């Protein structure tokens, strides 16, 4: 039996959460084409007869501009230091530049074994792959590179086998029927935030937090979810609500359907939009909204 922790590191939008969801076979992390989608380290667990892989999905490497994004980067740094293996997820479609090499070298310098998952191979010319891999090796990135497509499933089984082979021998570290360490309440908030990220453009989604006020299940089996969508500016509130409430109704409808799929039952969803100006730069509010500083 082999088991261990795998830190999933990479730039924002590299495809980390999408890849973990495919590897684990469950929706563990929300996905959108925007940076700052993942704000906290989320565990995804893949357990098989002879191995257990515990993935630590971290916030994407992102230039810090607020207290919250600074906290996100600290979460990534902390997660990278306490794992058995680092899986550096690189967006192959974006090519390879000096900043990519520098970031990989930074994590290699920790002395923790590392592999590179070179993603999005389904949307790029195949001839670019060997050229990029050679570029990495020539730059001193001396670790195995696995070209994969999470969307197509290309080389996913090969990647899993490689990850399992690199885990230390030992018993399972987490009960085998668990696929994530996050609560249902946490995931409901993330589902709502995902729909906002997908529907709204530019700066609005990044200034949004979702707070679950209540989450109960009635005797009839229907889940009652009451939540606040917190934004930073009155103008953002107007955009989120939309004309006659059309925008928030649409986002809430999509969220409710995914919540029902996640919970396996009917959901009655109530949403409110509130303004807390510059909450991402207010440590007290950041903590209140569930983003706790991580201890080393």
Image: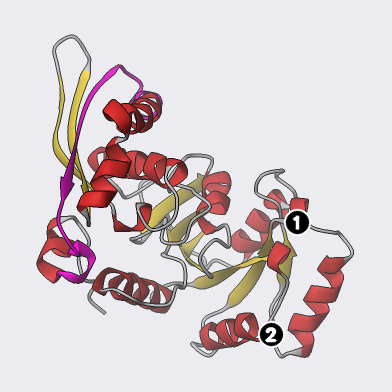
Q: Nearer the viewer, residue 65 or 80?
A: 65
Q: Nearer the viewer, residue 134 or 201?
A: 201
In this orientation, does residue 4 appear?
yes
Question: If the image is split into quadrants, where does the C terminus sit?
Answer: bottom left
Q: Which type of secondary structure does the marked residue at label 2 adopt?
A: loop
Determine whether the residue tagged by mark 1 lies in a helix, strand or loop.
helix
Residue at label 2?
Answer: 141
Residue holding disc 1: 121
Q: Position of residue 149 (x, y in %)?
A: 70, 51
Q: Look at the image and say whether residue 164 sits in the magenta stretch.
A: no
Quarter of the image for residue 254 reads: top left
Q: Position of residue 103 (x, y in %)?
A: 56, 83
Residue 278 part of the magenta-drawn span: yes
| Mark 2 Cα-neighbour bin, 10 Å: few <14, some 14–19, many ≥20 | many
Closer to viewer: mark 1 or mark 2: 1
Specify whether 5 is left or right of 278. Answer: right
Q: Residue 52 vs residue 156: left or right?
A: left
Q: Name the residue: 53% across, 52% down.
A: 33
Is 258 drawn above or below residue 45 in the view shown? above
Q: Is residue 176 visible?
A: no
Name the spot of residue 262 as percent of width and height, x first.
Answer: 38, 30
Q: Residue at x 59, y 76 (%)?
A: 114
Between the C-alphas of marks 1 and 2, the distance is: 20 Å
Categorize mark 1 by other alpha carbons within 10 Å: few (<14), some (14-19), many (20+).
many
Determine whether 41 is above or below 257 in the image. Answer: below
Q: Earlier in the sequence, mark 1 or mark 2?
A: 1
Residue appearing at x 43%, y 75% in the figure? 80
Name the quadrant containing residue 127: bottom right
Magenta range is 258-282
Residue at point 39%, 24% (across, down): 257
What number is the disc on residue 94?
none
Furthest-top residue in view? 220
């Amino acid at each position: 039996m082999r088991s261990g922790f795998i830190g999933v590191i990479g730039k924002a939008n590299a495809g980390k959460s999408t890849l973990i969801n495919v590897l684990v076979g469950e929706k563990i992390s929300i996905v959108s084409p925007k940076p700052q989608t993942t704000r906290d380290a989320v565990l995804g667990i893949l357990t098989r007869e002879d191995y257990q892989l515990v993935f630590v999905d971290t916030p994407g490497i992102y230039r810090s501009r607020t207290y919250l994004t600074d906290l996100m980067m600290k979460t990534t740094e902390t997660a990278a230091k306490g794992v058995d293996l680092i899986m550096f997820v690189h967006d192959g479609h974006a090519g390879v530049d000096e900043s990519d090499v520098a970031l990989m070298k930074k994590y290699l310098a920790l002395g923790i074994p590392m592999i590179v998952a070179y993603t999005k191979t389904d949307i790029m010319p195949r001839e670019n792959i060997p050229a990029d891999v050679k570029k990495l090796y020539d730059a001193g990135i001396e670790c195995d590179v696995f070209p994969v497509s999470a969307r197509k499933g290309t080389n996913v089984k090969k990647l899993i086998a490689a990850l399992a082979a690199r885990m230390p021998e030992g018993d399972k570290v987490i009960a085998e029927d668990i696929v994530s360490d996050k609560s249902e309440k946490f995931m409901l908030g993330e589902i709502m935030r995902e729909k906002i990220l997908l529907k709204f453009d530019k700066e609005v989604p990044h200034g949004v937090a979702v707070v679950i006020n209540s989450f109960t299940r009635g005797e009839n089996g229907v889940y009652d979810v009451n939540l606040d969508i917190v934004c930073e500016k009155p103008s953002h509130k107007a955009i989120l609500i939309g004309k006659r409430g059309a925008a928030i109704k649409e986002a809430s409808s999509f969220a409710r359907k995914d919540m029902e799929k996640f919970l396996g039952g009917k959901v009655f969803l109530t949403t409110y939009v509130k303004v807390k100006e510059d909450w991402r730069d207010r440590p007290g509010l950041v903590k209140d909204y569930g983003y706790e500083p991580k201890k080393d």
